[in-house]
Image (cartoon, rainbow, N blue to C red):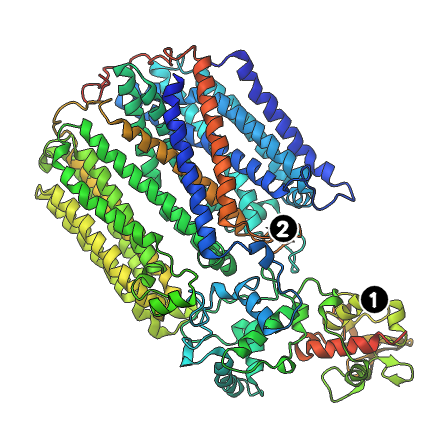
Amino acid sequence: MDAPRGARRRPEALLLAAFAVLLAAPAVLAADGAPEYRRLFGGDARIAVWVAAQLHLMLGAFVLGVPIFGTILEIVGWRARDPRYDRLARELTGLLSTAFSATAALGALFVFVLIALYPRVVTFLAGVFHGTFVLYALLIIAETATLYLYAGLWDRWGGRWKVAHVALGVLLNVWGTLLMLIATAWTAYMMTPTGLDADRTRFIGTTWQAVANPLWIPLAIHRFVANVSFGGFVVGAYAAVRFLAADRDDDRAHYDWMGYVGNLTGVAGMILLPFAGYYLGREVYSASAVMGNNMMGGAFSWTFIIQAALIGMLFVGANYYLWLGMERIPGAERYRGAVKYLTMALVVAFAVWLTPRNIPLTGEEQQALGGQFHPVLKYFGLMPAKNAAVNLIILSTFLSLLLYRRANRGRPRPFALQGRGGNTLLLAVGVLLAALLAWYGGSVLTLDPRTLDLTEAHARYLLVPGLLLVADILVVALGLALVHLNRPTAAVAVTLGTTAVFSVLVLGVWGFVVMERANPLLRHVAVVQWLLVMVALVWSTTIDGVVYRGAGRLGTIRWGHIPRRAQYALILLCVSSVLLMGLMGYVRSGLREDWHVYSVLRDTSESAWTPTNALMARVVGVIVLVFLGIVAASFWLARLSAGGPRNGPPDPPALGAPRQSQGAPR
Amino acid sequence: MTMRAITGPALFTLLVVGVFVGFGEVVTRISGESDRARRATAASGEVTPDAGEAIFFGRGKCGTCHSVSGRGSAVRGPDQGERGPLGVAIGKRAEARAQERARTTGRPFTATDYLVESLVEPGAYVVDGFKNEMPNPLRPPISLSPDDVRAVILYLQTLGGVADADAIRLPASALAVRSELKDTALLPGGDPGRGRKVFFDESGSAACGKCHRVKDAGGTVGPELTGIAGTRDMGFIVESILSPATVIASGYETVLVETRAGQIVTGIPRGEDPDHLVLVDAQGRPQRVRKADIKRRAPQTTSLMPENFRDILTVGEVADLLAYLATLK
């Protein structure tokens, strides 16, 4: 580790202070006569807790997301014998020391603020979760120790010991994921508490019952994927700033490549996030219909319009960056024509996603419109239209990635030359996907609508999605046949094209019919849409991966030769991603409305009302600026401790012949 | 890294955050949510159609699932306006539903009874094509007060019908589902005269006098209530009526006796001699059981007093009963 001695000690001291606070809190709070709420020097207690909690969460996401990203990079570099990945992974790990300090400091601040201002809430939660506090503290110690070993042993555990170093990186992520799981259990419990007595006033369950509450895993999955994406975008922005500041070609090449990797990671996570989000939303709805309805159709429906705008910026920004990146890739000109169609698809999809169902209108406006709703646009405000739009966005972005990946490649090798491995892989994935489609198709076609308070006759509304799943098995089989006939691009085109028709067009329209006549079945239609898209993504990636293996290159990628505006696209992605995280934190917490612990511990404070979107935007805006300031300071300190701007982490010793011929910095 | 190099990204970041903040302001103006803080506490305690409308689209969260013709966009529950089922608004539609409910249950149902049932027992009747998922608004997380529910029903009555507050008879279960069972402030004011009638009317729903004595009238199965208001607070009395097993008065614990012949006798012990045990059952009849025949004798945690007053009494009857009991000092 290159951090100075002082910087090394700071995290432990802060962490120990935080543990002490955390462990002592229940005893302190057990004292009788504690008030329910306090004000912060006359200021708003809720905003103080909000800011401290969200900043801690963002930094937590950063220090959990970056190691995942870094370890994957290290593994890629190790297996591909490409030292660039190892250098990048090490550079990122160097940032973690300062980021850990900041996370611990803000964690302590958050706990202090919470104990001081909301003693009753902390007493309740400590009563439920006190057992996990000790485990949490021990895990932080384990993670800190592992981080220092991981960073400090980078050089010593190179060469044949690399596997041990990678294992250390994996261990670091295991601790981090366990930490995230524990903290997520607390948060999720506040939304869906379990283990309560009949009056829902007293906790009588076990700690495990409280941990394994209905939203624990859905929220953890969403956070995990989001953390990876978030880490990728933050690294992308770091690379962008360094690129803009670079005065040497090799630096520009390095940071251009780093930005590309960051963006790729961010986009990969982003493609999965809507599905994780849908799963989470569905579980929120299953746990409490009131909370679920309030989320999408109540107080937060407009917040989701802002969310759609942010996600729109993320997807459009990511695609824009990919298209600009094609300028440095010889051969990419073959695909530039497709960009305008992808742009159109994205714009149309986002226009649909952003369309609200209705807005408050004056009498005159209603008269002019012929009612409260626009005769056509009103349909775009409903869930089936949103589902179709999201799936179209994901398919379009995936196609962008696919084209980008193919840009530098020549014609795919004949399938017969790919050997038994490629054939086996393709067959195994194809069979797996077909089995998945058959399983879910079967369960959809045999679903008894009476279990959802519908009549038996309503089963006909699941016939279309069920049959489409069965038809998709044939599409997978057709893809396999086309690959064997050396028509892999046609196979991918058929897969993506039919998925767009099935998932976006047919089920998009069918969703309206189901919503109107058998609303409870709509969630099954949405899952079918999701499954079709996922199958298309996995199948296309597999086919492309197999057939382009060993394909010729059309020249060397000119790293560093990318417009400066592409770097601003990366910064936009990072800022949008952080804003989105802040916004979703507001939604998750706000969904509890006037309950600290939903339906159990009521918020009787003067702040027992949901903040407006205007207030949310102001608070989140400030939080984001502070967070980015802390991250920038972490980067700056990491560079200082590394010995100045020109002395970044050295490249690791060569692990064999480096494969720099295709994408090496100039 | 030069300051100039980071100025551009910093300004760009400020611009993006600024646009986000501006968007939030615009959304708040368009959506009309700027009075959220006021609406969170508005209309509490008022029983008027206007208050009901405010609760319907506010704290009650009804508008999250139900539209009212041109107002709102929710589709999860039936539209309560003329665009809803049967093509008439809920105030009128409730009449047809009430007839259907009367046929199904065999009990008399008015349009208002249907509206009351729809709110306090939403799963009793589910409109075709919709899922049984409406929560009871008296329970957490919505937690409306009985008066809030009355106000909402008044508002629904005005949609195609006429508001009639007197017709709204909330069952006492509207109180019993709330954790604030002892909060008598939730009850409307009662009439002691009507309450005395409810107490002693043996053909009525309560008929408390069959078991409880007040001065020289009533039975002796349960504790005497003469002077009850001087020794117990009203919260305790409400709880004793609606949830009698919560606290059982000393000396009135129920015992279950099983004889060797398999007969089960449940009652309150009221004396014994060397050969017999005497239990008084729920009807006040003494039951003599030979001690030699007793196979098992088990104290019970339930009360002999019926547990179903929350279902058969209305909130108004409970209020009247309390008003009468409050005079017993």
Above or below A584: residue A362: below
The percent position of residue B54, horizontal first and vertical second, equals 56, 66
Asked if residue B139 is positioned above or below residue B256 in the image, the reply reads above
Q: Quadrant of residue A406?
A: top left
Circle 2 chain:
A
Question: Mark 1: few, some, or many residues within 10 Å (few <14, many ≥20)?
Answer: few
Residue at the spot x=58%, y=51% of the render? Answer: A193
In which quadrant of the rendered image does the C terminus of chain A lie?
top left
Q: Select label 1 or label 2 by which is in front.
A: 1
Q: Say which element carries label 1.
A: loop
Can residue B229 be spotted in the picture? Answer: yes
Q: Residue at x 58, y 73 (%)?
A: B49
Q: Tell me, for residue A501, which label it has, or none.
A: none
Which residue is the site of mark 2? Answer: A205
- In the visual, does A439 lie left or right of B49? left
Amino acid type, mark 1:
Asp
From the viewer's perspective, is residue A70 above or below residue B82?
above
Which residue in the protein does label 1 denote? B233
**At which x and y percent is residue A350?**
31, 49
The chain carrying label 1 is B
Residue in front for this viewpoint, B99 or B216: B99
